[in-house]
Image (cartoon, rainbow, N blue to C red):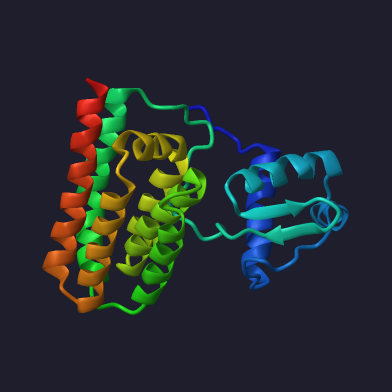
Amino acid sequence: MMVVRPSLSGVLTEQVLGLITESGLQPGDRLPTTRELAQRFAVTTPTLREALRRLEATGAIEMRHGSGLYVGADIERVVLPNPNMRAMPGGQLLDLLDARILIEPPLAGLAAGRPGAQELREVLGQAAMHLRGDDAELHEANMTFHRVAARLAGNSVLGEVVDSLLRVHASEQREILRLFDDRRRDHDEHLAILEAIEAGDAAAAEELMRSHLIDVKTVIEHRLM
């Protein structure tokens, strides 16, 4: 039986993560310099940089040019998006919407009555400002609405699943906005979901989110024919 030995880069990756944990560092906290880390782990700077690039790719650390190394915002993420994912063909795009239909409605129901609904209202306020304007700003506000609704459900892993789907497939989501081509209807459906969440009506929040995503899928199916 062949034993696979971990690469030096892999070992260094674990050592840096261990340092972060042992030191109690949080997202945004500064790490020692690259030179200091190389001396600490008795490796060359180029070897260490390879490990740091791997950590940066997953959001565990952030390398700020001219400033230094910092603990990344995604250090505790369980689910990570694939940065190499290419655009999906039409059939897979519908599969993506099917996945969202399965995941997001129950999360909207769980979010009902929980603290944080004010954040959703603020997000929709931003969306309303761009209904007749910038596509990119409207898209970002709409996606933020779905991310926050999932996060408010209180399940961190499922929240990350939704966040990853929306981040990895951002270009597909922008295409959905273009194809759906009914900004006001989209916004009104978001408002209805928000009102159910604010009212603590879990059944209504779940059903409204499901109807909203099914409406989107139905339009996209017709446009892809």
Tell me if 141 is positioned left or right of 58 in this view.
left
Query: Going 44% across and 54% down the picture, which residue do you hit?
Result: 78
Can you see residue 44?
no
Q: Nearer the viewer, residue 64 or 80?
A: 64
| Residue 167: x %, y % from top left | 46, 45
The residue closer to the viewer here, 113 or 21, is 113
Q: Is residue 123 left or right of residue 191?
A: right
Q: Is residue 71 visible?
A: yes
Judge whether 38 appears above or below 220 on screen. below
The answer to whether 199 is drawn above or below residue 181 in the figure is below
**Left or right of 138 in this view: 65:** right
Residue 137's x, y, as percent? 50, 51
Above or below for 198 versus 124? below
Which residue in the rendered view is the most extreme toward the top?
225
Q: Position of residue 222 (x, y in %)?
A: 20, 27
The x, y position of residue 127, in whole percent, is: 42, 58
Q: Which quadrant holds residue 181?
A: top left
Please name the residue shown 46% across and 54% down the image: 130
Please identify the quarter of the rendering in which residue 123 is found. Answer: bottom left
Q: Measuring 25% from the left and 32% from the top, which residue is drawn there?
A: 220
